Image (tube, rainbow, N blue to C red):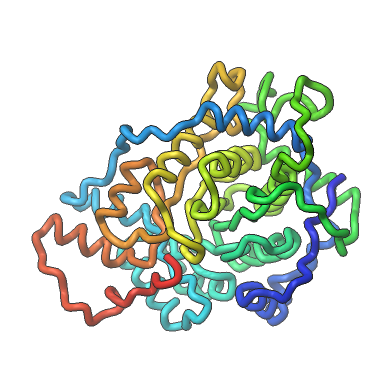
Amino acid sequence: MASSNPTTTTSPTESETLVRDFLAANPALDAELGNVEIMTDRYTNEEWAKQIAETQKKVAADKSRKYGVPDVTTREGTKDLAETVDHTVLKLDATSKQIDDLCSEARTEGFKSVCVRLNYVSRCVSNLKGSPVVVACVVGFHEGTQDTYEKLREARAAVKAGAAELDVVLNHSLLTKHNPTPKPSNHKRDSTADTITWKNTEANAKPQSGNTPSQGPYSVSSSGGNTPNPEEDEIPDYSAIYRELASIRSLCPSPTVLKLILETSQLNSAQILAASHLAAAANFDFIKTSTGFNGPGAKLEDVQLMVAAAEYLSTKQKSNGGSPVRGRKMQVKASGGVRSLEAATQMLEAGATRLGTSSGLWIMQEARQKAEGLKRPAPATRLYTDDSIGGY
């Protein structure tokens, strides 16, 4: 059975401090997780490496393919565009008024969601009551390197506070360094709870048809098989990543929507494909480009690659023995630097179905200008206050 990721021993970041202080002040949202333990792995690291290598070999971005985008010259098209937007404020110093404005704008424009930090989830839920706009909460933001147990606390508190979607930051450092040696966990084990957690995730993660594939992450047990045996230090710790993602999926089952933030600025193409493969295996709903707080945001070529990966991982093909890693196609969210109608259109044409941005108002205003020939209004309102500096 697997143990928890190492407990953080370095000084907490500002983001970690915000979450910890909020949970300490709101014990009702932070009921003890009990002894639910981190998921056991489904495969050895070598077996993950073999599966991921196949994905890396087969998937290439299709730069020529263009997906349909909403026709903003029509009222229905403008509405469809708005429903791709996760209206976002993630600055640590965001004020209650900014959050209230965010919700009011999202309700007025008909955005899909507002995306905020944990401390503002309840306020957004209250503000948006009676509206179709849902609340999304970031988890492990923005570093992604938090202890898995802390991410689980944050995720469960967000759902209890009313978040319908969670944008979880991948521990991308595990893909860029090889097999870190875990430190002993401080969290006690409970085999009964651990078994329940595993069965919950197994039920969530298996193909929706209920059939057991002949190959792929839902086939035979991890023992035996013609798997490669590379040196241990040549393989990133895929197992640790999967355990964390599967644990979050188990704790927050459907209909909670899970999006995995890859932080593509920190990864090469092979690592993006590895992360996409593990997200599919853990039954995440979306893969997402960036936090917007760590290097460049969404790049067109990364979105194209992620879309191609999502399609491959959900499709029965000869190369995967007719056994998709995930029964349903993951969607792709482009976030970070999407600040204009042109950028939004490019990302949607590349196959993204969701846009994370703090510039949603301007994007919609540009869409209306395009349709109606309106002049750009004077930059005196919040519409042109760039909340995206250092973020979305």
Image quarter for residue 198? Answer: top right
Give the residue at x 34% y 74%.
386
Q: Is residue 42 something that shows in the picture?
A: no
Q: Is residue 316 something that shows in the picture?
A: yes
Vertical comparison of 249 with 340: above or below:
above
Q: Which of the two residues, 259 or 14, is positioned nearer the viewer here?
A: 14
Vertical comparison of 327 with 381: above or below:
above
Vertical comparison of 355 with 322: above or below:
below
- On screen, residue 245 versus residue 332, left or right, reads right
Quadrant (top left, top right, bottom left, bottom right) of the C terminus: bottom left
Q: Position of residue 240 (x, y in %)?
A: 74, 48
Image quarter for residue 97? Answer: bottom left
Q: Position of residue 52 (x, y in %)?
A: 63, 33
Image quarter for residue 230? Answer: top right
Give the residue at x 69% y 64%.
146
- On screen, residue 272 versus residue 30, left or right, reads left
The number of numbered discs placed on residues in the rendered structure image is: 0
Quadrant (top left, top right, bottom left, bottom right) of the N terminus: top right
- On screen, residue 222 versus residue 262, left or right, reads right
Give the residue at x 46% y 68%.
129
Q: Position of residue 16 (x, y in %)?
A: 66, 73
Q: Position of residue 195 (x, y in %)?
A: 84, 44
